[in-house]
Amino acid sequence: MSITVHIQYAVPKASVPLQADFLRWVKAALVNQSKAGEITIRVASESEAAQLNWRYRHKEGATNILSFPFEVPSCVSLDVPLLGDLVICAPVVAREALEQTKKEQAHWAHLVVHGVLHLLGFDHQQEVEAQQMESLEVTILESLGYPDPYESV
C-alpha cells in the first residue's frame, strides 16, 4: 500500500504534530485496507474551521475535524486514487485535549484516525455504526501506543 499525505498549515507548525506523525497515523488507519492513494490534511485556524463547518454542515463554530471523502466521477480515471481531505482545527484540538485531560498528541492521533475512517466510508450516525467505528479506532490507537480515547480519565 502506497499512501501520500499532504499537509497544509494555516497555523504555525510549532503548534502541531510533525508530518511524520500524521503519516504514521494515516498509515495505521489504513493498515487493514487495500487502498492506496493520497490524503490532504489541512491544519486550520479556528476562524477557517468555523467557516468550513458553516459552509458544509450548516453548524456554527469550529469543530475539531471535518472529513471530505473524494468521489471520483465515473468519467474520470486516476492513476493514484484520492481518498479525500481532512481539515483539523488546531486550537480546538488543543482546547479539547486540555478539557478532557488527554495528552494533546494522543488527541491529534485519535482525530486523524477518526477522519481517515470517515474517508473510508465509516460513520457514527447510527448506534451500531458508532460502536463499530469506535472499536476500530481504539484498536488502531492501541497499536500506536495510545490509550482508549473513549475511556473516562
Image: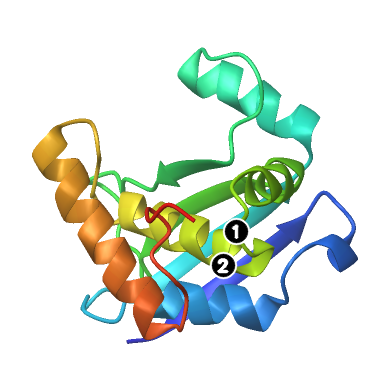
Which residue in the structure is indicated by mark 1? 102
Tags 1 and 2 touching, CB below 8 Å = yes
Q: Position of 116 compared to 34: left or right?
A: right
> Quadrant where the N terminus lies?
bottom left
Of 118 and 100, nearer the camera is 100
Q: Position of 28 compared to 10: left or right?
A: left
Q: How many marks?
A: 2
Q: Position of residue 52 (x, y in %)?
A: 62, 27
Of 139 and 78, nearer the camera is 139
Residue plotted at (31% across, 66% down):
138
Which residue in the structure is indicated by mark 2? 106
Amino acid on which the number 1 mark rests in the picture: Lys
Indicate which label's residue lies in the foreground, 1 or 2: 1
Q: Answer above or below: position of 46 versus 27.
A: above
Amino acid on which the number 2 mark rests in the picture: Ala
Q: Residue furthest left?
A: 128
